[in-house]
Image (cartoon, coloured by chain):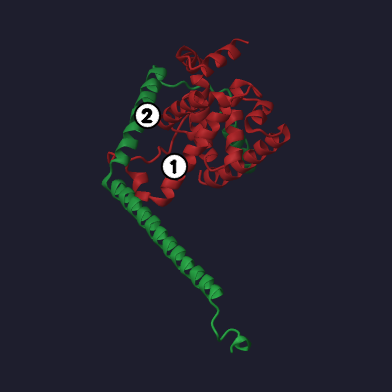
Chain colours: A red, B green
Amino acid sequence: MVEQLLIDRLKQGEESAFREIVETRQGMVYNTVLGLLQNAEDAEDVSQEVFIKVFESIHQFKGESAFSTWLYRVAVTTALEFLRKKKRKKRFAFVTSLFGENNQPRHDPADFVHPGVQLDNRENARLLLATIKKLPENQRVAFSLHKVDGLSYQEVAQVMETTVAAVESLIHRARQNLKKMLKDHYIESR
Amino acid sequence: MSNNSKNEADLEKILASLDGLEKAAPAPFFFTRLQARMARTENSYMQQVTRFVTRPAFVLATGLFVLLLNGYILLNKIEQKEIAAEESTQMLAIEYSNLNPTIYENPEETP
């Protein structure tokens, strides 16, 4: 009820409503985006982009799903668009992927560790996150939403606009692929 | 413990390493930075449009396009006028030949 009022106020262009939405949801959006991008700077940029999109397209939100589900969808779509753009840039312009506009190196840090990881799990989490990057897009999204954001299968299904069974299958396949990749690349090399 | 089961246990440990993950939060003053970006984007959009429209290449291309369009319309009009003039001459010729039959058209009527 309160949330609906907030959305109505935002639809009328009230800045205070927008501020309230950003203040209360910034953690959720940032966490989701960070889980998918695995880069703190990019996650900050893309999170800002998500809220700009929310501000500009709030009229498209018809209330058919919960606002948080819609927000997760916007966050996931924006993060995936960013990743695709990055991949395209890398493929077609190797030089620009190495150097940014100010000739600063822009290569990704290879050893991203999520800031929320427990200290004794850091090394394992680093391995897992690096391997998650290699998963197919939909498996990556489902796995990240479930593991990093802590969403249930039901909630992941709503965000991805699919069935719970499909999400179960995606996460199962993601686990199998991760196991195989970890086995091939890390366990064997130990 | 055999090597295989140790590897399996290690794998499970790695897969479970994100369990109980604490939520990450953006740096403080996120909204202030967002507001600044929105203001910057708004300004830069107008600047981009102005810069694009005033580029010599854009101005030249637009001028050339207008000239070409003018030329095309002009040529079309001249062509239409020529066709109309030709048609009216033909009509006049047909009409004239109907009104004044020559002796060669009806040889029986000749004295």
Q: Mark 1 points at which residue?
A: A86
The front one of A182 and A188 is: A182
> Is A24 drawn above or below residue B9 in the view shown?
above
For this orientation, the residue located farthest to the top is: A2
Helix, strand or loop at label 1? It is helix
Q: Is residue A91 left or right of residue A36?
A: left
Mark drawn on residue B41: 2
Q: Is residue B17 visible?
A: no
State the image coordinates of residue A86 (x, y, percent, origin top left): 44, 42
Badge 1, how many Cα within 10 Å: few under 14, some, many 20+? few
State the image coordinates of residue B5 (x, y, percent, origin top left): 65, 39
The front one of A6 and B6 is: A6
> In the image, which is nearer the foreground, mark 1 or mark 2?
2
Mark drawn on residue A184: none
Helix, strand or loop at label 2? It is helix
**Chain ID, mark 2:** B
State the image coordinates of residue A142 (x, y, percent, origin top left): 61, 34
Amino acid found under the numbered disc labelled 2 = Thr
